Image (cartoon, rainbow, N blue to C red):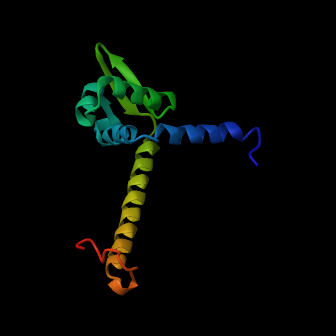
Amino acid sequence: MISAAQAPLYEIKANLFKALAHPARIRILELLAAAPDTAAPVSFLLSETGLEASHLSQHLATLRRHKVVTSVRSANVVTYRIAHPKIAELLAIARAFLLDTLADSNEQLRLAQDLPSTHLPSGYPAGPSA
C-alpha cells in the first residue's frame, strides 16, 4: 500500500513515463540527447521529426509540463534542452532493452523456424516460404 506521503513521489515517476509514452516524444528526446549540449532549436526538431509544427508544439509542451525538457527563447528562436542528464541515460537503457528484446525474439523466431514441420497442425503453413 502506498502511503499518503509516498503518493506524490510515485505520481512524479508516473508523469515521467507519461511524458515518454509517445514515439514522437522519444524521437524528440533522442534528437536532443544526440545534439551538442543536449539542446536544439525547434527548426531542427521540425526538420528531423517531420512533424507538423502544431504537433511538435504539443509534444514539446507535454515534455515541458513533466519537466523532461526546458526551453529558452532568444529573439525568434526557441531552443529545447534535456532537463536532466539522466534522461539521456534512460534513453540509452531503453535502447539496450529494445535491442535485447528484439534479439530474444529473433532467436525464438529462428528456433521456431527450425522446428520440423511434422510438429505443425495439418493445414498450417510450414514456414515463411509456404
| Residue 125 occupies quadrant | bottom left
**Residue at x 24%, y 36% (from the top left corner):** 48
In the rendered structure, the answer to whether residue 87 lies left or right of residue 106 reads right
Q: Is residue 121 shown above or below 41?
A: below
Is any part of residue 43 visible from this angle? yes
Residue at the image position 30 percent from the left and 77 percent from the top = 126
Residue 116, position in %: x, y? 34, 86
Mark yes or no: residue 116 visible: no
Instruction: Residue 14: give x, y in percent of width and height.
Output: 58, 41
Left or right of 67, for residue 32: left
* Quadrant location, the C terminus: bottom left
Tell me how many marks there are: 0
Q: Nearer the viewer, residue 35 or 96?
A: 96
Foreground residue among 36 and 116: 116
Which quadrant of the structure image shows residue 105? bottom left
Residue 110 pos. (x, y %): 32, 75
**Among all residues in the image, which is located at the extreme top?**
75
Relative placement, left or right, of 40 versus 93 is: left
**Percent from the top left, x then y, of residue 22?**
42, 40
Query: Between residues 47 and 116, which one lies in front from this camera angle?
Result: 116
Q: Where is 42 relative to 122, above or below?
A: above
Which residue: 39% across, 64% down? 100
Front residue of this view, candidates 31 and 54: 54
Residue at (26, 71) in percent of width and height:
128
